[in-house]
Amino acid sequence: MALLATRTRDVAGAEDALADALVAALTTWPRDGIPKNPQGWLLTAARNRLLDHARHQQVHEHSTPTLKLMTREFDETADPDRWPDERLKLLFVCAHPAIDPNIHTPLMLQTVLGLDAVAIGRALLVAPKTIGQRLVRAKTKIRQARIAFEIPTADQIPERLEAVLNAIYAAYGNSWEDASGADQRITELGQEAIWLARVLREQIPDDPEVRGLLALMLYCEARRPARRSADGRFVPLSEQDPKDWRMPMIKEAEGELTAAFQMRRPGRYQIEASIQSVHAERAHTGHTDSAAIAAFYDQLMQLAPSIGGAVARAAAHAEVRGPEAGLTLLDQIDSRAVISYQPYWAVRAHFLRQLDRPQAAAEAYDRAIGLSEDCAVRAFLTEHRNRLTPQ
C-alpha cells in the first residue's frame, strides 16, 4: 500500500488498485499456485490496474504524471538514505497540514498500518462508525481538493512529527491489547511499530520525543512475556516476576530515555517512558516507587491530558494515598467519556473492593467484565468479583 500510494500520489486510488489485485489473487492463486514472490505479484497487478485506469482518463494532464510514476520499477527509491521505509514516508505524507489534524492519526492507521475502523476506534476511544465517516470524508477531500501528495522537506518534518509518533504508538497499543499473542498479525504490528520508531530515530536522532517513544515501547515490550502465566492466566504488572522480563530490551530503553533527557526538551512520550522506567526498576530494587509514578502522572496530565492518563493517575495515587484518594480522582473524570472505557471500571471495582463496598464493586466489575475483549482478563476480573462478600 505504501509503495503504491507514494508512487501514485493518490491514497484512495492505490487502495482501490490493491483491492482489485487481492481479488485477482484469490481467483488465480488457488488455481495456478502461490507465486514465488507474492508481494511482487500483488504490486504488479495493482500497478497494471492503475495504468489501465490512467490510460482511460480523458484529461491528459492528469494521466501523464501517473503513467510516468507507475512505469518506474518498484525497487527504485528517490532517496533511500533519507527514507529507508516506504511506510514511514507515507506516514508523513498523511500528516499534510491541509488535512484535518483530527484525522491524521486515523488516516495513518488505516492507510499505512492496515487497521480497520473498529481497531482504530478502540485505540482512539472513538466509535468505529464515527471513525469510518471521518476517513471517507478525509479521502474525498484529498481527492477533490487535489491536496499535494508530497514528501515533506526537512523543515516541514517537525510540524508533522507529532502526528506520526501518535500513529506509531496507537499501532503499538493495538498490539499490546492482544496480550495472548493469539493474532499473529496483531503481534507483528507491535514489532513493526518498534521497527518504524527505530528507523525514525536513525533519521531524526536529535528529537527527544522520538527517542522517548522508542523507549516507551521497548519498556512495554520487555514485559510482554510476563503478562501471561504458563497456563495462560492474566498477570497484572504488580504481580509479574521481573525474571520474566527481557532485560536487554529494558537496557536499550534506558539508553534511549537517557539520551532523550540529555536534550532537555521534555515531552509526553518521555514522561510515559519515565513511568515505565520506574516500574522496570523493580527488577533491581525489588520494590516500586509509587510516589514517583504518581508525580510523573501529574506531569503527564498537565502536558497531555487523556482519559487513559487520568485513570492511570488515579491508580497511581491510590498506591500512595489509599483507595479513597484514587476513587476521588476517578469521580473527577467526565462520566460520559468512560461509559465504554474498560480500564476505568476495572480500576473503580478494585478501589471499591478495597473500601469494602461489595455491591458497588460488583456493579463495577460487571461493567468491566462486559467490556473486556480478552478472555484471560475477563476470567481475572470474574475471579475477583466472585470473592466479594455480599452485605
Image (spheres, rainbow, N blue to C red):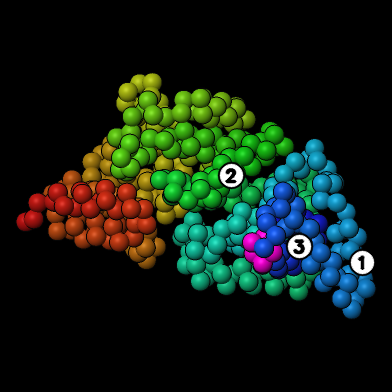
Quarter of the image with the N terminus in it: bottom right
Q: Nearer the viewer, residue 102 or 33?
A: 33
Residue behind mark 3: 46
Using the image, tell me which numbered label, if any, was put on residue 193.
Answer: 2
- Position in image of residue 3 (x %, y %): 75, 53
Magenta stretch prevailing secondary structure: helix
Residue behind mark 1: 64
- Position in image of residue 134 (x %, y %): 59, 69
Magenta residues, as a range? Answer: 26-30
Separation of residues labelled 1 and 3 (CA atoms): 18 Å
Using the image, tell me which numbered label, if any, was put on residue 142.
Answer: none
Residue 223 drawn above or below residue 337:
above
- Residue beneath the point at 61% across and 60% down: 110
Q: Nearer the viewer, residue 246 or 289?
A: 246
Of the two numbered discs 1 and 3 on the same chain, state the one appearing first in sequence: 3
Of the two numbered discs 1 and 2 on the same chain, state the one appearing first in sequence: 1
The type of residue carrying mark 1 is Thr
- Residue beneath the point at 49% across and 28% down: 250
- Position in image of residue 305 (x %, y %): 47, 51
Residue 104 drawn above or below residue 267:
below
At label 3, counting other C-alpha atoms closer than 10 Å, the crowd grade (few under 14, some 14-19, many 20 or more) is many
Q: Residue furthest left?
A: 391
At label 2, counting other C-alpha atoms closer than 10 Å, the crowd grade (few under 14, some 14-19, many 20 or more) is many
The type of residue carrying mark 2 is Ala
Helix, strand or loop under label 1 = helix
At label 1, counting other C-alpha atoms closer than 10 Å, the crowd grade (few under 14, some 14-19, many 20 or more) is few
Helix, strand or loop under label 3 = helix
- Position in image of residue 319 (x %, y %): 28, 38
Q: Nearer the viewer, residue 368 or 76?
A: 76
Tell me if residue 175 can be seen.
yes
Helix, strand or loop under label 2 = helix
Tell me if residue 333 can be seen.
no
